[in-house]
Image (cartoon, grey):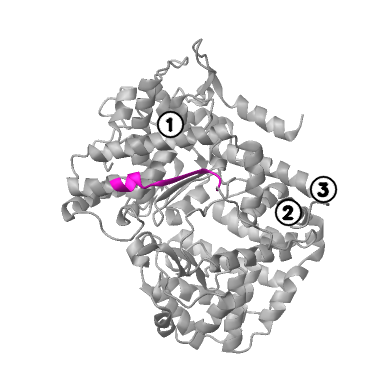
Amino acid sequence: MTRRFALLLALAACSKTVQPAADQPAQTGIQLGDLDRKAAPCDDFYEFSNGTWRAQNPIPASMDRWSRRWQSGEQNKEKLKIILDELSAKTDWPAGSIEKQVGDFNAACMDEAKADALGLAPLKPMLAELDAVRTPADVQVAIRKLTDLNIAAPFGFGPTSDPHEPSRTIAALGAGGLGLPDRDYYLKPEPRFVEAREKYHAHLKTMFALAGLTDSPEQVFAFEKRLAEASLDNVALRNPKNLDHPMPFDELVKLTPHFDWVAFYKAGKVEKADLNVAEPGFMKAFDRELQETSPAEWRGYLKWKVLAASAPWLSKPFADESFNFNQKFLGGVGEKKPRGVRCAELTDQLLGEALGKKYVERYFPPAAKARVQELVKNELSAMKEIIEHLDWMTPETKKKAVHKVETFNPKVGYPDKWRDYSGVHVKRDALLANIAEGQKWEVAFEHGTMGKPTNRDFWGMTPPTSNAYYNPLLNEIVFPAGILIPPAFDVNASDAVNYGAIGVVIGHEISHGFDDQGAQFDADGRLQNWWTEQDLKQFQDRTSCVANQYDGYFIKPGVHHNGRLVLGESIGDLAGARVAYLAFQKALAAHPFKPADGFTPEQEFFVAWGQFRGDQIREETQLLMIQGDPHPVARFRVIGPLSNLTEFQKAWSCPAQSAMVRPNRCDVW
């Protein structure tokens, strides 16, 4: 039996078959064996819906969280590995073909013995260049070179749709350059941040010693701390208005007069046109560093950025030290994933649409795309109906909200036009050079979009990605093929399961157009108010209810979610469940069915969401999440939205005093 078919059988075994009526095809239902019957659904639905599965399936040592969804995502990477192994086994693919590029990239990545034998050698030429930095002008040349490698040192530079005229793409500058997860890790006095700083100091020293660098780790940390002090925190970053600072090129030059932007733009082949500077305060701090920080300090910092970016793919001592700090300490992960899986992830990152084209040819049938498109259509209709029946929104704002729903652009599965990677020069025996080549190609591609009409066919995720997104600037919802597999979606699953799992995800992404961020963009993607003053006040009051709810969710004593940080995703879960449930009710009326497991169709809908979303997450990862992740941890993504829904209470006949029935329910959409 091949590994591919073994995986398919394993996926099939994950589903419980419901006995169909004589005129119906077999349909898969909820996972009865995953339920924890000792838990009452009205008390703890997270535990009830799949507590048994979590108890029987502890988090693998190489993962920071685990559930059927994450298991499915890792199995998907095994499918990518099958493709990559087949392509890399053949050496005579036509030059320039995606088969040769992807196959040769994977072959170089898989040669771990060569990486170990080479040690630091692949990085020495770049480190030598940086070691030659002696003047302020040298610092600027080095920053340009690192920008070409997609390394933010210390700012990020890339394209964005103009938030005031989304039909055009402009350049954007953003803060970056930190080695710890965010600014608070450098500044806050709580013990967990103090410990992280101590561990990071030790990590810097170890990495510098491994690389034989004589630069000062203490100076690098001090440099990063100054950058952190000039950066916005994660809550402030969620407000689009805080990041909206359009300016002409000449104003950028005035903002940071000690940096040669003319040379920077010329090197990147970018037109000197209007741009957006997300954090002007950070760029002013960058300009001060150019004046006040010695080339020697800059030299050490820049070498560290290159070393940190490359370490996972250098020899074992570097890769292990990088893993021990970034994954083991920060995330609680016990061991690295197998190299084949990591190479699949890397190939997807750098050659994603080339690999993705091969993936969808093999694993994503047209029937799956058509069925998901139908679900999306039904849920957009449900969202429109919800808006039309709101009792708190005036007709003037309703009209604009409905128009926004009607102009959504759904993308399902994969792009209509694939990217051309023929300009990426891949060698079969040079992994670090291939990574650099891939990054340079991506940066050049992005630079080439600046100053041009916005490409609405562009995808921000690769087809094998197990995720989805909403882009407010383009008013689009995107569902890659990688998430459109069990347990999220199955063409053979009941409507209860499909609407309860991927359906809530679809509703979630739709409602991002109307969360605290998305609601600031109109139907054309412009960052401008389209609400009446009365309606906006009502909306903000309702979203405050959600923020307050999640403020009360604790990871451990004294450590809880920041409701404002997770507000958008929490609104998305709440509205997504409601939108999906309404669409499901319409589907159920048209195609009624009776589950053979003792549950009602409505109960199966909610169980499907609990089973899809019910991750078990390491405590270290949860601590990372509440600090910087806009998503709540899994327990509260199940309990939080459902405890606000009267539909859930009715489906399970929950008494009013039940834990899963909030006395002060939040109702946004």
Picture quadrant of residue 605: top left
Count residues near mark 3 (Cα–Cα under 10 Å), then give few for <14, some for 14-19, many for 20+.
Answer: few
Q: Secondary structure at mark 3?
A: loop
Question: Is 446 situated left or right of 81 in this image?
Answer: left
- Report the Cα–Cα distance between label 2 and label 1: 41 Å
Picture coordinates of residue 264, whole percent (x, y):
54, 79
Question: Which residue does the numbered mark 1 point to in the structure image?
Answer: 500
Is residue 613 placed above or below 335 in the rendered structure? above
Q: Nearer the viewer, residue 65 or 251?
A: 251
Q: Position of residue 492 (x, y in %)?
A: 54, 25
Within 10 Å of disc 2 (Cα), the crowding (few <14, some 14-19, many 20+) is: some
Residue under the point 25% across and 55% down:
530
Q: Residue placed at 47% from the left, 62% from the top?
A: 193
Dot placed on the residue nearer the N-terminal end, 3 or 1: 3
Say which of 256 and 393 sits in front.
393
- Please name the residue that numbered disc 3 is placed on: 90
Location of residue 505 in the rendering, given as x and y in whole percent from the top left corner:
44, 40
Q: Amino acid at mark 2?
A: Ser
- Write the start and end of the magenta stretch as one range: 403-415
Residue 306 shows up from this direction: yes
